[in-house]
Image (tube, rainbow, N blue to C red):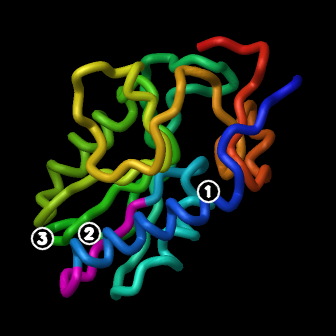
Amino acid sequence: MKYKRFIDQETLARRVGELGETLSKDYEGKNPLLVGILRGAYIFMADLSRSMSIRHTVDFMAVSSYGASTTTSGVVRILKDLDTPLFQRHVIIIEDIVDSGLTLKYIFRLLSARLPASLKVCALLDKEIAHPGEQLVDYVGFEVPNRYIIGYGLDFDQQYRNLPYIAHFENIDV
């Protein structure tokens, strides 16, 4: 499959650093918990965590709504839940990409029920066109076109996560 690069490594590094600085300022003295949504967010979350200058902790959830398809199944399954209690914690959900918003809305409702002190969302990529008029993300790295995105942790059938940049397939529409 042919793909085309559209966000290079340097641009990614600069924007992730800016997000880390913003989160550090906004959460100064709060020791936030970063909740990475596996598998796609692991590279972004590692770089984001390293760019933060404040004390924070990390945990991970694994969810699935795509399987091996390029479109969501409409069913969100929890494959791995958090190990950390959220009660009265400042929690930041770390997402690789927000597409339809289905998975994120499900996770947000689930985690809200655990009574955190605050709950925000930081996403590297947002396809706002896929969820028009809905403000789902508090901290956005990049708005991207409605294409199937790969690289920097994002996959197609568990492949291409290792690309150090963001790309999209030239022959797959979503």
Disc ID at residue 88: 3
Element at label 2: loop
Separation of disc 3 and disc 1 at Cα? 35 Å
Task: Give the residue pinned by disc 1.
Answer: 11
The amino acid pointed to by label 1 is: Thr
Q: Horizontal and vertical percent for residue 168? A: 71, 30
Q: Earlier in the sequence, mark 3 or mark 1?
A: 1
Disc ID at residue 152: none
Separation of disc 2 and disc 1 at Cα? 35 Å
Element at label 1: helix
- Residue under the image location 41 percent in, 64 percent down: 19
Q: Horizontal and vertical percent for residue 105? A: 28, 34
Q: Is residue 154 above or below residue 130?
A: below
Tell me if residue 79 can be seen: no
Q: Earlier in the sequence, mark 2 or mark 1?
A: 1
Q: Please identify, in this view, whether the residue under mark 3 or under mark 2 is nearer the observer.
A: 3
Quadrant in the rendering for residue 13? bottom right
Look at the image and give the residue range highlighted in magenta: 28-35
The amino acid pointed to by label 3 is: Gln
Q: Residues within 10 Å of mark 2 (few under 14, many from 20)?
A: few
The answer to which of 18 and 46 lies nearer the viewer is: 18
Tell me if residue 41 can be seen: yes
